[in-house]
């Protein structure tokens, strides 16, 4: 029973991590699309990219 609880907990953690990764990717894609549609300056796009990369690297240690 205990092993089942641990397994479910790990599964939940993995699902949460995956959800966070997916959400971050979707947000980044949306920001990039909106920024390119608006035709904003390169400086803004670079700033957004830097923020997105910082958020991604904070949340996901792998995505460096």
Image (cartoon, grey):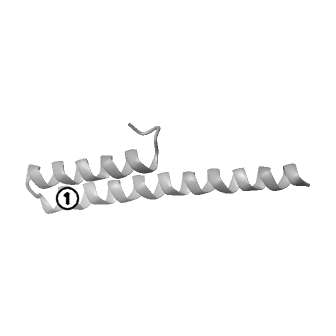
- Left or right of 58 in this view: 47: left
Residue lying at 34% horizontally and 54% vertically, measured from the top left: 29
Q: Secondary structure at mark 1?
A: helix
Which corner quadrant holds the N terminus? Answer: bottom right
Q: Which residue is situated farthest in the right direction here?
A: 1
Residue 63: which quarter of the image? top left
Between residue 37 and residue 58, name the one nearer to us: 58
Q: Residue at x 59, y 57 (%)?
A: 16
* Residue to which mark 1 is pinned: 35
The picture places residue 14, in percent across and down from the top left corner, at: 63, 50
Q: How many marks?
A: 1
- Image quadrant occupied by the C terminus: top left
Specify the farthest residue to the front. Answer: 2
Q: Residues within 10 Å of mark 1 (few under 14, many from 20)?
A: some
Q: Nearer the viewer, residue 37 or 52?
A: 52
x, y (%) of residue 2? 87, 53
Residue occupying image coordinates x 82% and y 56%:
5
Residue 36, percent from left and from top:
19, 55
Question: What percent of the width, then of the height, locates residue 49?
Answer: 24, 49
Residue, x 31% and y 46% (percent of image)?
A: 53
């Amino acid at each position: 029973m205990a092993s089942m609880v641990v397994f479910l907990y790990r599964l939940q953690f993995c699902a949460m991590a995956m959800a966070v990764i997916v959400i971050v990717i979707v947000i980044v894609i949306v920001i990039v699309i909106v920024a390119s549609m608006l035709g904003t300056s390169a400086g803004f796009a670079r700033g957004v990219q830097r923020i997105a990369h910082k958020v991604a690297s904070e949340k996901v240690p792998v995505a460096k």
